[in-house]
Image (cartoon, helix red, strand yellow):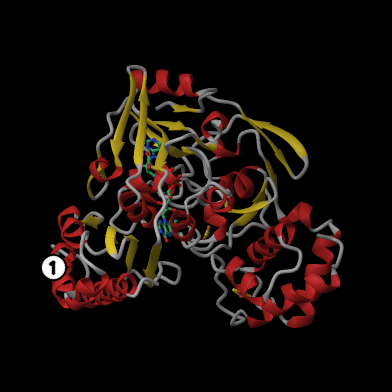
Amino acid sequence: MANIKFTLNNKVVEVDLDPSMRLIDALRLHFKLTATKEGCGEGSCGACVVLMDGKGINSCLMPLANVNGHSIITLEEFKKTKQFKVLEECFADEGGSQCGFCTPGMIFAAQSLLASNAHPSEEEVREALSGNLCRCTGYQSIVNAILRAAKEGEGLW
Amino acid sequence: MVKYIPASKEDALNFLASHDAYIVAGGTDMMVLKRNAAGLLPKFDKDVLYISNLNELNKIYEDKEYIHIGATATLDEIYNHPLTPKLLKEAVGEVASINIRHFATLPGNIANASPAGDTIVIDYLLDAIVKLESKNGVRLVKAENFVLGVRKVDRRSDELITEIMFPRFSYDGDMWYKVGSRKADSISKVSVAGLYSITDGKISKFALAFGSTAVTVRRSHELEKEIEGLTQKELLDRCEEFVEKYSKIISPIDDQRSNKEYRLMVAKNITRKFIKQVGEGK
Ligand SMILES: Cc1cc2nc3c(=O)[nH]c(=O)nc-3n(C[C@H](O)[C@H](O)[C@H](O)COP(=O)(O)OP(=O)(O)OC[C@H]3O[C@@H](n4cnc5c(N)ncnc54)[C@H](O)[C@@H]3O)c2cc1C
Ligand code: FES
Ligand code: FES
């Protein structure tokens, strides 16, 4: 069986897992990293989004074979960053998280956006969130939280 | 079952020569198609070749005749690349979501051959060429001839798409229209792309391609020839005639979805709009 080697939360890991295994299953079942959530399992809700090489990707559609050689960051690691602290506070202040199920994916959609565009317009934020569904908030508070994070975290991205 | 991560294009072609295998690029179609219950491996019933890490197929470059888009370039990379043809950029920017565009590919869209494949409409309109490579050499197939039906394409099992090639040419005006989206589970959708040129007061180039309205993308070279050579006024005067003629080639041939009439109406409206755009030279 092929050896899969990649960087997980800034540490190199080498595993003998089936290359066809979904990244989300490897994260939750093998590595016991359960911050990443599974909603639809087919790419349309964004609950499972993590960062691959700094960009948001759906871990429910990502086979381990394609992760080989890349860098994955999950919320367990991202929580330690300054960027997360700012996002966390802004989500809390704006009411951007209610049940919280969509939040890990939303945080990474936000991080992925801000990393490439530190001063997004409201429309750009909405576009960046278009692959992430939320059943609770009605989105406006999430959009506000991200716009506010861009301001309060000035210089971080 | 073998699940193979090739080290190079050559390695991948050798594998395909000796295995009847599925190819997975981004996996955004394949992982849905082969989906299993959470925690279980996807249901593949034969060998699988994973190509997304082949960096040698990641390039986007140009030569005198073509813009070449490598098979593992992601839709997001294509969207952001300065060489990407304008219409392709517009269509790519509306596929799925930004997260998915971070790993989905262009060959994946056309090889999946869904009637709703957005970039296939652009491949048809821009006369794109699918470059297929195998141990036996290279085969170039026009996109229009590559798609044979729903999920059916002209690819031998030992062949890998290594590039999509877009002929370089300029034109005066264009249009890209995507109605509805899959985002919030809405399936009803029509996509239309068009382009034209005017030379010495006459329409010298006219092309129109429709997605999602029939089993495959539709484009009519006959109608295009009929329109080319007309003056803009002649085209405007005959607008309804051509809308009707186009509606014949785009009518959904089976009622796979209940909104067949709706789609036809939308397609006709967009055709009319494009004819007016060409007629008024906008
Ligand atoms: C939630 C969601 C929304 C989507 N929305 C849209 C949308 O709005 N518009 C749209 O057009 N599509 C959409 N798609 C479909 C999909 O994202 C696209 O078709 C994408 O371009 C497929 O690329 P891929 O690399 O992921 O393909 P894969 O899943 O890896 O492959 C798809 C097919 O192409 C074949 N293939 C891939 N690469 C090669 C190659 N180099 N040589 C030979 N065969 C190859 C595979 O064998 C397979 O049959 C959506 C998908 C999801 C999950
Ligand atoms: S669980 Fe991956 S997108 Fe819904
Ligand atoms: S907070 Fe409940 S789904 Fe978004």
In percent of the image, x 78 and y 76: which residue is there?
A: A148
- Vertical position of residue B238 compared to residue B208: above or below: below
* The C terminus of chain A sits in image quarter: bottom right
Q: In the visual, does B51 lie left or right of A54?
A: left
Question: Looking at mark 1, is its residue's CB closer than 8 Å to ligand 1?
Answer: no
Residue drawn where x is 60% and y is 43% of the image: A26
Q: Is residue B5 above or below residue B254?
A: above
Give the side of residue A96 with respect to residue B144, left or right. Answer: right
Residue shown at 44%/59% (left/top)? B91
Tag 1: amino acid: Lys
Depicted B129 relative to depicted B117: above or below: above
Pick the residue in front: B260 or B176: B176
Q: Residue B245: x and y, percent?
A: 13, 68
Q: Which residue, as the protein is rendered here, is positioned at the far front?
A: B200
Q: Nearer the viewer, residue B126 or B147?
A: B126
Q: Is residue A10 left or right of residue A57?
A: right
Residue B213 appears in view: yes
Question: What count of labels does the image hold?
Answer: 1
Q: Residue B12: x percent and y percent?
A: 45, 24
User: Callout 1: 10 Å neighbours few (<14), some, many (20+)?
Assistant: some
Q: Write the residue at 61% across / 66% down.
A: A128
Task: Residue under label 1, please give it.
Answer: B245
Measuring from the top left, give residue B182's x and y in whole percent.
40, 67
Give the quarter of the image for residue B1: top left
Image quadrant in which you'd find residue B146: top left
Looking at the image, residue A94 sits to the left or right of residue B26; the answer is right
Disc 1, SS: helix
> Which of these two is toward me, B220 or B111?
B220
- In this rendering, does residue B211 appear at all? no
Q: Provide residue A52's location: percent of width, then percent of height.
A: 65, 47
Chain of the residue that carries numbered disc 1 in the rendered image: B
